[in-house]
Structures are given as structure tokens and as C-alpha cells.
Image: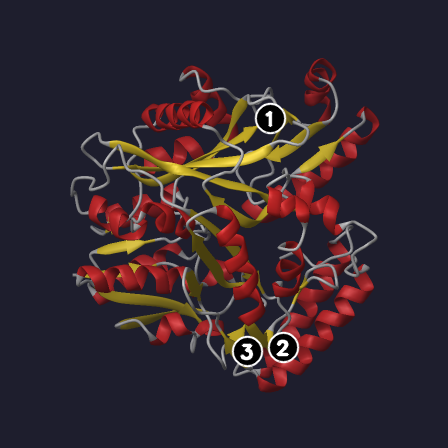
Amino acid sequence: MRLLVANRGEIALRIFRACRDLGIETVAVYSDADRAAPHVTSADYAVRLGPPPSAESYLAIPRIVEAARATGAALVHPGYGFLAESADFARACQSAGVTFVGPSAASIEAMGSKTRSRELMQKARVPVVPGTTSAARGAGDLQDFARSAGYPILLKASAGGGGKGMRRVDREQDLAAAFSRAAAEAKASFNDGSIYAEKLLERPRHVEVQLVADRRGNRVAVGERECSLQRRHQKVVEECPSAAIGPDLRDRLFSAALAAADAVGYDSCGTVEFLVAPDGSFYFLEMNTRLQVEHPVTEEVFGVDLVTEMIRIALGEKLSIRPDIAARGHAIECRIYAEDPARGFSPSPGVVERLHLPEGPGVRNDVGIEAGSWVPIDYDPMLGKLVVFGPDRETAIDRLARALEEYEVTGVETTLPLFRELVRQPDFRSGRFHTQWLDDWLASPRLVAREATAEETFLAALSLTEAAGRASPRPARDRSRWRETARAAALRSGEGRLRR
């Protein structure tokens, strides 16, 4: 039996390892930018998809389905990102006689629209943040809601996530401009400019519940994760369990998450995300109908293999995780990005000259690079994830601090310096943070890091890219294409940064 991973980097390697444990052969797909990447060289089979742009490679459904057919792959795992939450991709696999390792297309579709999922949750009596339930045609459609709910409100892309197409609005006079920017970003990111609005909760925590469900009606909540440390709505650090959740609130969160899964007949691994207010009230945010980036912290605390479980469920097997599974200890994950925190977190493409990974008790590395790897500008710049485990949160933090000091990457800039400073912060160590905390901390004048201007970011990125390009295995014409991409991105950004 063979399984094709319709993804790249560390998640492809993670899924390949699960396949080897199960005795399943592996198939990698790749773009020209990734032709020598570790996920390609480690697979049993590899198929070229096309040039670097995602639309011509990792988002090209017909090419991926044909790759599965050509290699005789019986299963396709989408990983996360790219086509992981594409109902069209799930249907295309089914039509080709290939098993999609994930939920049904109907479940993906039901939770893929933020407005429709809100309607479903309201019917299932899952608490939702006060907001609109249909896409707005313009800013005027949101004025009545904003006036009744009160400012601030949050504009959100109906079809998206990851902070794209999201804008905070504090005053009515700012609504029209914010709507225009949010809709344009949503259209560029998801090919869907639909926008809806929610009441903005001040200083909430972002807590998510891991669900695992088989195709026989068995569903289990496998703990919760703390995901409040975010930069511009993008998760940066995740923990399991959440230090802010007590037994009673945990039970109520689990019940709400299971009700959400029941509402769409969910099977496979998935995550229901909630905002938890300071008073303990909580509200449904969204359901991710896929494997999460932060799944390793759950695996470490509960002693499970979520990827293997997904594959077994897709093959029709019964859920092996018991409803009474218990947590043990504490785990923390840091996402290591090829970004420069000192210059507005601008991308840092290039060649990894040296990579030294930390080791020792309680340390896990999920990485997609090795020394000599080319880090392209074309995709999300996450290089890997550092995961630490300890018998309690304090021990886990101490191990994280030690591991971060051991971690070394040269050739590209990374977010490692940010994490080394973060673990020294009293608020982090005590768990006193919320979804706005990291942005507030990064804006502190005490920090050396600052947001670069658009011109500085472009010039720095151009310099890095030209230097890296001399060592890059990619042809020279790609470097000129990158220069144009960087220039356009810098000019589009009103916030003085390159968009990822």
C-alpha cells in the first residue's frame, strides 16, 4: 500500500514516519523550488508537480490526483495548509478512487465557511461570538450590527484563517476603509472576498480542543491546547494543556467541541477552536477540519500518534483512543520561522549553512530542513517546530529555555532570538497572557526589534535573496522573479512588511 502526501516540508516528513510505522510506502510531490528538499529525498517515490508558484504545484488538484494514479497510491494525506481543507480536493480523490485521509467533503464544506459554520453551531447550541451570519456586500451592511454590539468589532474573511482578511475596527469612521482592506486581502488570499463581523472580545485566550472520530460513530476529545501567544492573529507558541482551564471549564469545552463534531457528522482528526473570556465564558471560533500544526504537544501529553490514527480511520478501522484517556505532564511548541524579528519579521530566504538541533530528555524536533537546504520565498517560511515535554509546566519551560540555547541555524535569519527572549518574560512563565499579549510585548520600546519600513524591508529582503541566490540551486530567472515579487509585496503592504 502507498500513501501520497500532498504537501511539503516538516509535515510531509512527519506523515512519512507514521507510514513507515504502519508498513506503508510513501510518495512525495514537489515543485521545482523543492526538488532537493528532504521530504523529496526521503520518500519511496517522488513526482514533480510543476514550477514554484503554489497554483502550479501544491494547489494543482489535477496534477496531484494524477501523481497518485501514476504511482499507485491508494491514500492521499493533505497535511495542513494548501489543500488540507479543500472539499473539491477531497471529492477529486474520491472520484479517482483514492482514499482521502481526512473527513468527508461535506464536513469540510460545512465548516469551511465561517458564516455557515456559525449558523450550524447556533443550531447545535454551541456558544458563538455575537456577529453577523451572512457575508456583507459592503461596509454599510455592518453598521447596524456594529452600533448594536458596540465597538470594537472584528472584520473576518468568511473563507479564510491565519489572520488573513482580518481587521480590528474601533470607530465607525474607520469601518469603510477597514472593510475595503479586509475584502481585498481575503480575495487575494482565498479567492473569496466575503467578509463578516464579530464583536471583538478584549483580552481573551485562544483555546482549542483536539477531536478524533472514526467512521463508526466514536468520537473523543483528546485534551485542549493553549494557543493565545499569537503575532497578528498567527499562532507562535502552543501548549498542552492550558494553564488557564480548570476541570469544570474543560468539561464544558469538551462537550461543546463534541457537539460541533456531531453537527457535521465529523470523522478523522480535527480541532474546534474557542475564545475564552476572562470571566470563563467561551465562544466557538472555528473548526479546523484537518491536522493542526501544533498536534505534537497533544501527542506528547497523551502518548498518542494522531497521524497514525488518521490513517487507520481512513482505512475504516475503529478508533483506538479511549474516551477516558488521561493527560500526563505538560508540552510546549515553538514554531521556528525563517523570518527576521529585528526587521519586521521579513522573510529570510537562502541556504541553510548549518543546522544543530537540541537534544536531551523531553525534546522533540519536527523539522523540514537539513544543512544545505534551500529555503524558498514561495511558501510559508516555517522551518520546523521545537517541542518540549516535562512532568509539569515549570519543568517544560526550563527544558525549552535550554533547548533554545542549543538550537543553531545559520545562513538564514530565524525567530529563535524571539523565543529566547520570550521564555525569560515573567508573564510567559506565570501563564498571564492573552491573544493580544505578544503583539503588545513586541511593540514595547524596551525591545530592540522594531517594525521595518516598507523600503527597509524590501532592501533587506532583496540583499538577502541576492546573496542566497548565488548559492541557490535554482536558476537565475527565479531570482529576478523573486525581486519583482518582493517589490510588489512591499509596495502593497501598508504596514511596512512583506506579506508571507
The residue under label 1 is 277
Residue 454 is situated, as x and y percent measured from the top left of the image, at 79, 60
Q: Is residue 299 left or right of residue 411?
A: left
Residue at coordinates 45% horizontally, 40% vertically from top-left? 241
Residue 479, disc: 2
Q: Does residue 171 sit above or below 161 in this rendering?
A: above
| Cα–Cα span, label 1 and label 3 | 42 Å
At horizontal 60% and vertical 78% (from top left) the residue drawn is 410
Q: Residue furthest top?
A: 148
Q: Few, some or many C-alpha atoms within 10 Å of disc 3 (few <14, some 14-19, many ≥20)?
A: many
Earlier-in-chain disc, 3 versus 2 = 3
Q: Look at the numbered disc 2 and give the secondary structure of its residue.
A: helix
| Mark 3 or 2, closer to the camera | 3
Crowd class of label 2 (few under 14; some 14 to 19; many from 20; radius 10 Å): some
Between 428 and 309, the one nearer to me in the picture:
428
Location of mark 3 (residue): 352
Q: Nearer the viewer, mark 1 or mark 3?
A: 1
* For residue 335, side relative to residue 146 (left or right): left
Q: Give the quarter of the figure containing the N terminus.
A: bottom left
Tell me which residue sits at (79%, 50%) in the image. Answer: 444
Q: Is residue 138 above or below residue 46?
A: above
Earlier residue among tags 1 and 2: 1
Q: Quadrant of residue 105?
A: top left
Looking at the image, can residue 311 be seen? Answer: yes
Above or below 465: residue 100: above
Q: For the residue carrying disc 1, how many other residues have a C-alpha within 10 Å: few (<14), some (14-19), or many (20+)?
A: some
